[in-house]
Image (spheres, rainbow, N blue to C red):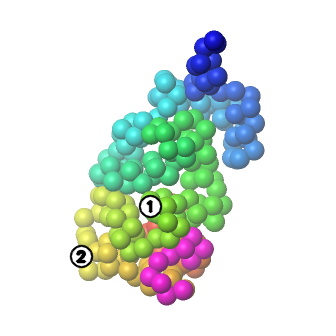
Amino acid sequence: MGNKNSSKVDSTILTPKAIQMLKANTHFSEEQIREWHAGFIRDCPTGHLTKDRFISVYEQFYPGGKAKEFCKYAFATFDRDNNGTIDFTEFMLAIAMTQSGDLDERLALAFDMYDYNNTGTIDTTELTKVISAMYDLTGETNRKGDHDPKHRAEEIIRICDVTGNKKLTKEEFIAGCKNDPIIRRLLVPNV
């Protein structure tokens, strides 16, 4: 009898409950959260960041690269409820993780992005695709020899795969990245 849309939450409104949750799960203050929210709503008046808008933002940060493939993986990782958009909470959790999370958290997030088929492991094919997407993003054109994405993926898995199954678990990935600065710099830049 009542309006069935009455239970929907207005995604443009930052509620006290959302602020408390974000303060508890990020390193941001209430003032910073409110500032981020104002900017998010200015850029995304509906309260939702679409994949196309996400790509265009990345293209601004990497003008010499091609952001589309990389953004496919990143967007899927940040769209935690898989509804095809990123809301403010998902956005803030992603920002917090990529900017100020500790090394293990950031490496775990990177693993989740690279494990785009959600099997709990990363194989050579997945890693090759992500490395190619990272090259596209940064404008890297040298893809021969040691820079070949498949060669890089095979080398990373060879170094990090302690079980010998030619796949990396999250634990192997994190340990391998932490113990090898070259791998860490390639797979998790800005850490």
Quarter placement of the N terminus: top right
Q: Amino acid at mark 1?
A: Asn
Q: Left or right: where does residue 1 sit relative to residue 187?
A: right
Q: Is residue 178 at least partly visible in the picture?
A: no
**Which residue is drawn at the image coordinates 75% and 44% (left, top)?**
24
Q: Which residue is mark 2?
A: 144
Left or right, 37 with respect to 76, comes to right
- Counting from the top left corner in percent of width and height, residue 107 is at 57, 65
* Amino acid, disc 2: Lys
| Residue 162 position within the rendered picture, expressed as x and y whole percent measured from the top left | 55, 86
The answer to whether residue 30 is above or below residue 45 is: below
Q: Residue at x 32, y 72 (%)?
A: 149
Residue wearing tag 1? 117
Q: Nearer the viewer, residue 149 or 163?
A: 163
Q: Position of residue 117 (x, y in %)?
A: 44, 61
Judged left or right of residue 33, residue 153 is: left
Quarter of the picture holding the C terminus: bottom right
Q: Secondary structure at mark 2?
A: loop
Q: Tell me if residue 108 comes above or below residue 34 in the rendering.
A: below
Residue at the front extreme, as displayed: 1
| In the rendered image, the vertical position of residue 188 relative to residue 177, given as above or below | above
Question: Which region of the structure is painted magenta?
Answer: 163-172
Q: Nearer the viewer, residue 124 or 99?
A: 124
Find residue 132 and report its horizontal and vertical position in percent. Answer: 32, 64
On whether residue 167 falls in the magenta region, the answer is yes
Query: At numbered mark 1, what does the secondary structure look like: helix, strand or loop?
Result: loop
Residue lying at the far top of the rendered structure: 1
